[in-house]
Image: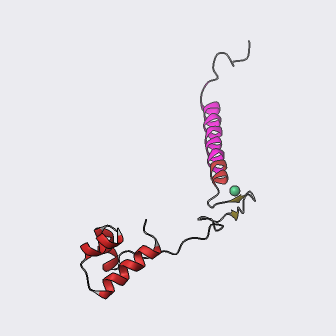
Amino acid sequence: MLSIEQVQSVQRLLAAGECSQREIARRTGVSRPSIAAIANGTRVIQPPRPIDEPAYPAQRCADCGGLVVMPCLACLLRRHRQRLMAEQRARRKEAASGIQPTPSRRPAA
Ligand SMILES: [Zn+2]
């Protein structure tokens, strides 16, 4: 990744209009495709992120109260597990009501 200083020196040389992109590449050590991108404005300079500022700030999860990066994976997993268990219970209930009990469960006569 190019530093701001590199991008700015390329921009200065481009604005001066005294040398070709090839010459600018030779002088700055920046690749020609990068210089072309800077020249036509498709490369934007992003200010460096302060070190103490995380890329994805943590928030309080409204469900579990955990300090997490949203969406809260713990809550997603818990809800998923609850849904699976509810489906399993429904299936078991269905099986128990519809089908004859298995021989091992049949009460002794
Ligand atoms: Zn949560």
Which residue: 31% across, 87% down? Answer: 16
Q: Is residue 108 above or below residue 64?
A: above
Q: Residue at x 36, y 78 (%)?
A: 10
Closer to the camera, 83 or 89?
A: 83
Residue at image coords 61%, 32%: 95
Question: In the displayed structure, does residue 20 sit left or right of residue 46?
Answer: left
Question: Residue 65 sits in which quadrant?
Answer: bottom right
Residue 80: in magenta span? yes
Closer to the camera in the image, 60 or 35: 35
In which of the image's four quarters is ligand 1 placed? Answer: bottom right
Which quadrant would the N terminus be assigned to in this image? bottom left
> Quadrant of the rendered structure where residue 98 is?
top right
Q: Nearer the viewer, residue 57 or 40?
A: 40
Q: Residue furthest top?
A: 109
Can residue 21 be found in the magenta stretch?
Answer: no
| Residue 21, percent from left and from top | 26, 76
Residue drawn at 29 percent across, 68 percent down: 33
Q: Which region of the structure is painted magenta? A: 79-100
Spot occupied by residue 28 in the image (x, y as percentages of width and height): 35, 72
On-image quarter of the C terminus = top right
Q: Is residue 42 left or right of residue 84?
A: left
Q: Main secondary structure of the magenta part?
A: helix
